[in-house]
Amino acid sequence: MVLVYASPVLLGIVALLLGRFPVLPLTGQARALLVGIRAPRVVAALLVGASLGLTGTVLQALFRNPLVDANILGVSSGAGFGAALALMLGLGVWGVRSIALATGLLAVAVTVLGARQYIERSRLMVTLMGILVAALFGSLTSLLKYLADPLDTLPRITFWLLGSLATIGWRTNLFLAILTGSGILLVYILRWRVNLLSLDETEIAGLGVSPARLRTGFLVLSSILTAGAVSVSGVIGWIGLVTPHLGRALVGSDHRRLVPTAVALGASSLLVLDTAARTVFSAELPIGVLTGIVGVPAFIAIVRRRGERW
Amino acid sequence: MWLEARDVTYSYDGSRNAIDRISLSLDTGEIIAILGRNGSGKSTLLSCLAGIRQSAAGTVSLDGVDLRTMTPRERALRVGYVVQTVEEGFSYTAFESVLLGRTPHLAVPAGPSARDYEIAEEALGSVGLLHLADRPISDMSGGERQLVRIARGLCQQTSILLLDEPGAHLDPANRERVLEVIAQLALRGTAFLFTSHQPNDALGYADRAILLRDGVVMADGPPRAVIEPETIAAAFGVRTQSFGPAESPALVSLRPPVVSPESIGQTGGFLRELYERGEPAGNLILVTGLRQTGKTTWCRALVDQAEREGINAAGLLAPAVFDGRHKSAIDQLNLRTGEIRRLAERQRAFKGRWAFGNNDPRTAWTFDDETIAWANAVLENERGANPAVVVVDELGPLELIHGEGVASALSILDERRYRLAVVVVRSSLVPRALDRWPWAIPIRTDQRYRREEIGDAGVVE
């Protein structure tokens, strides 16, 4: 268990040493590469991965659905649309991120407000609303891709949508660290409440907690975290879906142990994949593609082994 | 701690009240059992009492303080609520699941303490599940999950615990164990209110029993006064019999016995006994069975036997008319005069008035209004003539659900001036009949009156 919790740090150190250019011995150029490019990317992978693991776990509990990750609320589709729009408008990195963040949050807001009278009673209605909102923003993104200049804008949109940690610098990492850190802290403080999330609403109410407030609170928290992560990294799937399952296989379903485990696993797995994406092949693979290629078989393996024991 | 409900009313759709002006009070150490049919409002009442549903009218108060003025947590520290079967969430272990019951006792940033673990362990132990503490709920049987839910309720350590069907899914031993835990904790001052479909749970363990029917209180009092065959028949539409010693009786539901029509002529025979004891208030038997089980033939044999005994039997028979093996019409026969009229015909093409949700043209029946009026007049006439045995064949949905057909003449059955009434009713309508005549005794016909047994030729059903 200690190994799981220590893995982000250990793997982080290893990842710093790996790359096309050797950083040992630590010359001036190597130091510049390490501090300016490789380290921020490693930190970004850890932060985004941790965030995906955390929100995936919380949302799976909330929806009592093992097939859920942050996409269920339409955040990713919303952010993707915003990014595509910003890229069409020719905005810079921060412009793209701000608009992606805004549309990601907008998508969640539409989902949550659209389903607000059902939040207490019906998970299915919230899920349905999320799928609908995601579909709408997905179509809008397709429209933009159709209209985009195929030589210049379209590849950039496609590249963004496939996810990348390459452009994340220290300032972005600070933003991510504050966001993810406070999210992890909040969930840690409320860790007992996360266990209540997957109960029936009458049971939650019987234990003296308002189901509507509990669910809305965690929905909003997850949305903000996801929107923040997606707006800087692009759409990275599967980490949020698979790590909670891996975590449950390791430590069981009690969220007091599952949440930190999923956070650590999310951070480590994204780091490993991103490191592989930039080192194994001569040309860098989009991280969103790699997470799918690795995540899906991993998911199949876990589900086949554990059966319906979520 | 003292829970009081006054005129609690709740409606899901705003038009029909699921529970209607229910008042009750639950005192320290008291056990109340709530019985009623499926859909009678038991669960709704419990969730109102737990403060989870806000009663549309009326109040629920704890020690005189309105539940609505309390925060959810304050409420959950005093009133626990074990809900009926729910879909399980993630597969927490049994112990983790029970531990969730400590939630109202925990400050928000904190998790459970060693003391909380002890309490959860004790709760799990009291339902006899400690050896399964680490088993995921998803690997447990329905009964084990039920025990875990109950243990969670106990773990909440409230002074009032509401349990929705605590005995559901449990084998007899576990059921007794749970009720015994309830009884023991009640001695220490916890008040319990539980719903059940087993009258004996109330008889054995409750201080008070409340029977609900369509959202209103039908009976309320000491279990031995409330839980007896006639109220149970009216509440559930099932015939039961009381067994065991007077100080701890138990009700057993009975399958309608097979009764021979000739027993009216046998000393000590089933029908003879009923006939003899049919004073001052007459006995009523319900001749039940599916279609074509020989109910009418059975009635005819009874009437014949009664005549041989010199007993005056009158009323209506409903012989079927067959077209090959196919029942094509129903007649109505006045037993006093022998007059026969056509009551209903099966329509090849649908044009009937009484389709009852069945719009399949091949099975629609058309009833003759004139015959219905005539049948009513026959029964009305018999009411004046006052025969010893009254036969009414057959009461169907028309009478028992829609209040039409011969329904208006049924006061002859209510008045009980006969010694024995014989009413033919299909099995599915027995609860309806018991609604109206809770003292009625359902019976089954002999195999030998089945149509298959006696062949097709010249036989009425």
Image (spheres, coloured by chain):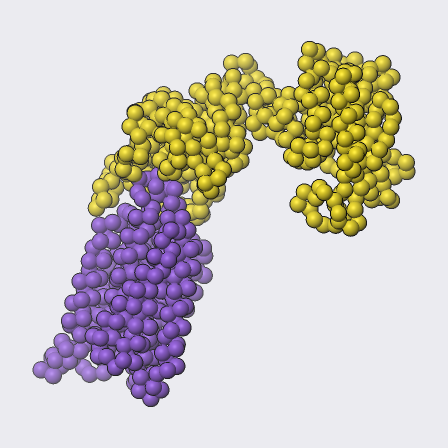
**Chain in purple?**
A
Residue at figure coordinates x 29%, y 59% from the top left: A222
Residue B398 figure quarter: top right
| As drawn, B339 above or below A181 | above
Q: Colour of chain B?
A: yellow
Q: Position of residue B419 (x, y in %)?
A: 74, 15
| As drawn, B138 above or below A305 | above
Q: Position of residue B220 (x, y in %)?
A: 48, 21
Q: Residue furthest right?
A: B457
Nearest to the observer: residue B158 or residue B330: B330
| Quadrant position of the N terminus of chain B in the picture | top left
Let me know if residue A10 appears in the view: no
Residue A36 figure quarter: bottom left
Nearest to the observer: residue B3 or residue A179: B3
Residue at figure coordinates x 48%, y 39% from the top left: B15
Residue at figure coordinates x 44%, y 28% from the top left: B21
Q: Residue furthest bottom?
A: A151
Q: Is residue B205 left or right of residue B369?
A: left
| Quadrant position of the C terminus of chain B in the picture | top right
Q: Position of residue B441 (x, y in %)?
A: 68, 23
Let me know if residue B326 appears in the view: yes
